[in-house]
Image: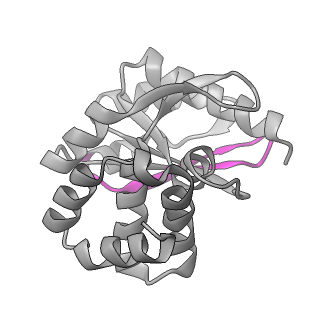
Amino acid sequence: MAIEGMIGSIRLVTGALDAEGVPYAVTGSVASSIHGEPITSIDVDIVVLMTPDQAPRFAGRMAPRFYADAETLRRAALDHSITNILDQTTGLKFDISVLAETPYHQQLFQRRIKMAHPDSGVTFWIVSPEDIVLMKLLRRRDTRSRKQWDNALSVVRVQGSRLDWAYLRKWARQLSIEGDLEALAREAGI
């Protein structure tokens, strides 16, 4: 899919989240590509703080272009779990992760950045470089995925000393991924 199609879809989804007052941040490979080295993505990951009442209204805003099941979104909001919506025009899938308001997630949303996508100028909220590193390491902890490691490594290599290492170390310790963060820093030459 062309970058224009992906960015257009992101604009529609994030616009609907904004219209419903749902705090969100783009994460995953899209965020890794913006903060690190460019990589190809087959889906878009978005973290949200969505209430069960907001879920059906958000689903309604997505119709008819997107397949977004209101009840599935409502359950994800209740359970703080992941669901997806599908752009039926482009075939692009959005993984929507409804986060619980933990201390770390509160920090993630306080640190998110509103920025323009470098290829289009479309603006949306995105996780900070530090938080994409932490999120990739958390995902890797659960899956042992080399892809998650490589994405985090890409961000560390590009951002290097501009990263807030005190923040990274504090949360890595609290999230029990301190060893992985230190190994990542060593591999990146930091």
- Can residue 6 be seen here? The reply is yes
Q: Is residue 18 above or below residue 151?
A: above
Q: Residue at x 51, y 67 (%)?
A: 153
The percent position of residue 171, horizontal first and vertical second, equals 20, 57
Q: Is residue 33 above or below residue 110?
A: below
Q: Is residue 134 above or below residue 60?
A: below
Drawn side of residue 104 relative to residue 148, left or right: left
Q: Residue at x 32, y 49 (%)?
A: 75
**Colour mapping:** one colour
- Residue 38 painted magenta: no
Image quadrant of residue 117?
A: top right
Q: Is residue 155 above or below residue 92?
A: below
Which stretch appears magenta? 78-95
Q: Residue furthest bottom?
A: 144
The percent position of residue 174, horizontal first and vertical second, equals 13, 63
Q: Nearer the viewer, residue 24 or 79?
A: 24
Q: Residue at x 41, y 19 (%)?
A: 20
